[in-house]
Amino acid sequence: MLSLILPTFNEAKNLPVMIPKIEETLQSVEHEIIIVDDDSPDNTWKVAQEMSEKMHNLHVIRRVGRHGLSSAVVEGFLAAKGDVLAVADADGQHDLSILPIMFAEVKSGSNIAIGSRYVEGGSVGDWEEDRQSISRFATALAMFVCKVDVRDPMSGFFAIDRETFEKTLSKLNPKGFKILLDFLVNAPKKTTVTEIPFVFGERIHGKSKLEFKVKVEFLEYLYDVTVGRFIPLTFLKYCIVGSLGIGVQWGTYYSVSRYILEAYNLTIVGFSIALLSAIEVAIFFNFILNNMWTFNHLKLRGMKAVGGFLKFNVACAVGAFANYAVAALIFSQGYREITAVVVGAIVGTFWNYTINRLVTWKG
Ligand code: GDD
Ligand code: MN
């Protein structure tokens, strides 16, 4: 049996067009349809539930408090009864007429059958230049990390046999849109793939949900499965934030000493005031950026963020002290201010990663 998953977010108007089309295409294939909706504000789940009352083979999963195309697909697969699991967009862009071919391919021994835009006979249709080049670029990057030779690893239209799905399940990282790529990267070595060409169509109603965040998640994923095996992404991000923080510290130090203290020949007291304020500003800057970006999967909000910021300060205190002590020492030896401030900041940054992993963003 074929289990077709339709992930949906705000597709209320498309479902009444899509479902009859699918039924017609799959007339000769035993199948079920599972709609996985993320509590769409346009009530897609309700439209789906109403339709399912009249169709015994249509099931609806309404997810609350969870979000994302890939994880919706995995959840649909988990609820499915078929021995072949497939997914298609619910907006009409995938050519459903190839579904029976995809099903037959998997039945006859392919582990994965992909509806492909990049094999002969397929195309992306009427996309604008930009989206075409972004898609080609993303596809080229994705092909680089795939174990299997595939032309369209970013397709959102594919079928997979239950066994391959189950063998891969525990390794998946279902963030963003790259669910097929994730299967191709983690599937067992001998996995066989067939690509069936199709022309990517126009959306019936509504607009794409492929936002900036999804693109960033894709790049992070590529990093994770390559260099990330050696240098964890969180650590890299923390270092980037830290380096920017050093710039912020120098900038603040410079502004305070020149414009507020108006001193060009600083005494150690003036130096200390300017530096300590700069350290606090840098701590604040690092906290905000780390919370929003480095540790976005553990993001602290509201009062928790205030508490986190206090903890972050405490955790940074020893680093800040080292930062100050080293800088003051270098300064008092008559070195240039920038040397003193920057070297101090580097020493402080080193300390901070470990301690904040232990105290602020545990997880
Ligand atoms: N449940 C759920 N949750 N469904 C979602 C979510 C979500 O967060 N985001 C999107 N969807 C659903 C949409 O409602 C639609 O049915 C399908 O997933 C595809 O989303 P679109 O927003 O239409 O994606 P697209 O057309 O820009 O991208 C398509 O092409 C890409 C390759 O160029 C998709 O097929 C992608 O999977 C594919 O990578
Ligand atoms: Mn679409």
Image (tube, grey):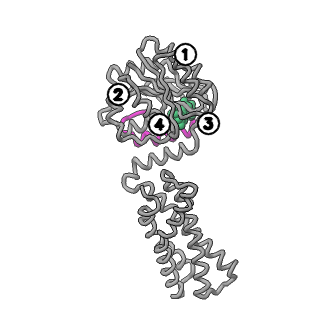
In terms of depth relative to the viewer, which is nearer, 160 or 139? 160
Check disc 3 and give the amino acid type.
Glu
**Residue at (54, 16) in percent of width and height:** 20
First in sequence: mark 1 vs mark 2: 1
| Numbered badge on residue 20 | 1
Question: Which of pointers 3 and 1 lies earlier in the amino acid sequence?
Answer: 1
Asked if labels 4 and 1 touch by Cβ distance under 8 angstroms, the answer is no
Identify the secondary structure beneath mark 1: helix
Q: Earlier in the sequence, mark 4 or mark 3?
A: 4
Residue 274 picture location, percent across and down: 61, 79
Q: Which residue is mark 4?
A: 70
Kindly identify the residue that appears in the image at 35 percent across and 23 percent down.
83
Q: Secondary structure at mark 4?
A: helix
Answer few, some or many: residues within 10 Å of disc 2's Cα (few below 14, many 20 plus, some between 14 and 19): many
* Dot label at residue 209: none
Residue 255 place in picture, x, y as percent: 66, 74
Does any atom of ligand 1 lie closer than 8 Å to the CB of label 3? no
**Amino acid type, mark 2:** Arg
Q: Looking at the picture, how far across and down is residue 109, in whole percent?
A: 32, 23
Question: Circle 2 sits on which residue?
Answer: 162
Q: Which residue is painted at 58% across and 82% down in the image?
A: 272
Task: Name the side, left or right, on which 339 lies relative to 350.
Answer: right
